[in-house]
Structure formats: structure tokens, C-alpha cells
Amino acid sequence: MATETLTKWTIDTAHSEINFKVKHLVISTVTGKFNSFDATLETEGEEFEDASIHFEADINSIDTNNNDRDAHLKSDDFFNAEEHPKLTFESTSFKQIGDGQYKLIGNLTIRGNTKPVELDAVYGGTVQDPYGNTKAGFEVTGTINRKEFGLKWNGVTEAGNLVVSESVKLDLNVQFTEEG
């Protein structure tokens, strides 16, 4: 019985985005992103099912288009970038559930708190770029509760509404390059 070869993929950071959205004052949404991140994906052969995925983002690269807010997010009120400079994700399962649809399960660590998360992944396809590199694209989405990861700061308006929602929507558009 032949053993499948391990295929390694690395994230193409120039063609990938790591975004999140959080409700502010219940009435609007603030969008942010991480500008510095890294990820690898390992598969048996050419199929992505059961892929092993590792991801990390540099907390100091958080960008919400507002320097004061970014500084607050890096502080101990939220991520505490000084003591916890990275957030990480390690997959435990990557299963195909439909045509081009996957369920991604793994352990997300933020601020030293590790919790299992379940995300949806849509496979965009695999192509060769003009330089002969094999590329694969995915859109990964899901929602986490920031308080479960120790991001507990909050204020309350006079009407009793939270200033910052506990739910954080994740939206990752990632492109991987097959290592040759």
C-alpha cells in the first residue's frame, strides 16, 4: 500500500486578509484586521480534507483605522499585546461537508486562553498563477465570544447597551501557495 506524500502550503500574505467585525453601541459595526500573520497547511496528497492548519497573527499589527482604538485593543483591557504578542490557531479537524464546503475545527488561543472553535470554510479552487505556482483559496468565517478569551473590557451606555459586543465575526480570505 503506497503512502500519500505530504504536501505543504504556505499562506500568500500579499493575497490574503484576516478581518473581524464587532458591533459598537449596538447600532454600527467596526471592522478591523491583522496586517502581520502567517499560516501553513499540510495535506496528504492533493486533497484538503483532514488538512493540518496552523495560523498565527501578530497582535501589534491590529488595524481598525483608528490609532487610539488600536492602542486600546493592544492594552491589557483587551489583547495585552505586551504579554501575549500573538494569537494562534491549530486545527483538530478539517472535514468536507458539501461541494467546496468544509467545517474547520481547532483550538484558538488568545491572551493565553485556549478554546475550541468551529469555523466554516469555502474552497475557492486551485489554479496555477502566471509564474507556475500552484495556489489554493479559501474563505473562512465564524463567530467567537471575545469574553471567553479574556477580552473582557466593556462599558455600558445610559440605555444599558454594551459599548462593544461580546460576539466577534471572523472573515478570513486566504490564498495558499504549494511548496515545491
Image (tube, helix red, strand yellow):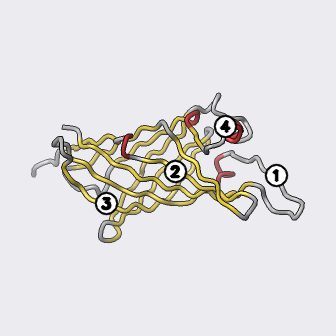
Q: Amino acid at mark 3?
A: Gly
Q: Taking 162 as reference, is 31 left or right?
A: left
Mark pair 4, 1: CA separation: 19 Å
Q: Earlier in the sequence, mark 3 or mark 2?
A: 2
Badge 3, how many Cα within 10 Å: few under 14, some, many 20+?
A: some
Q: Earlier in the sequence, mark 1 or mark 2?
A: 2
Q: Position of residue 126 (x, y in %)?
A: 23, 55
Q: Amino acid at mark 4?
A: Asn
Which residue is denoted by mark 2 in the rendering? 19
Question: Which quadrant holds residue 180?
Answer: top left
Which numbered mark, 4 or 1, is in the foreground of this view?
4
Which residue is denoted by mark 4 in the rendering? 67
Q: Taking 51 as reference, is 89 left or right?
A: right
Q: Amino acid at mark 1?
A: Gly
* Residue 39 badge: none
Mark pair 3, 1: CA separation: 40 Å
Question: Which quadrant holds residue 59?
Answer: top right
Q: Secondary structure at mark 1?
A: loop
Q: Taking 127 as reference, is 157 left or right?
A: right
Which residue is denoted by mark 1 in the rendering? 155
Q: Earlier in the sequence, mark 3 or mark 1?
A: 3
Which numbered mark, 2 or 4, is in the foreground of this view?
4
Q: Earlier in the sequence, mark 2 or mark 4?
A: 2
> At 76% across and 59% down in the image, what residue appears?
25
Which residue is denoted by mark 3 in the rendering? 124
Label tally: 4
Mark pair 1, 2: CA separation: 23 Å
Mark pair 3, 2: CA separation: 18 Å
Badge 1, how many Cα within 10 Å: few under 14, some, many 20+?
A: few
Q: Earlier in the sequence, mark 3 or mark 4?
A: 4
Q: Residue furthest top?
A: 82
Q: Position of residue 33 (x, y in %)?
A: 54, 46
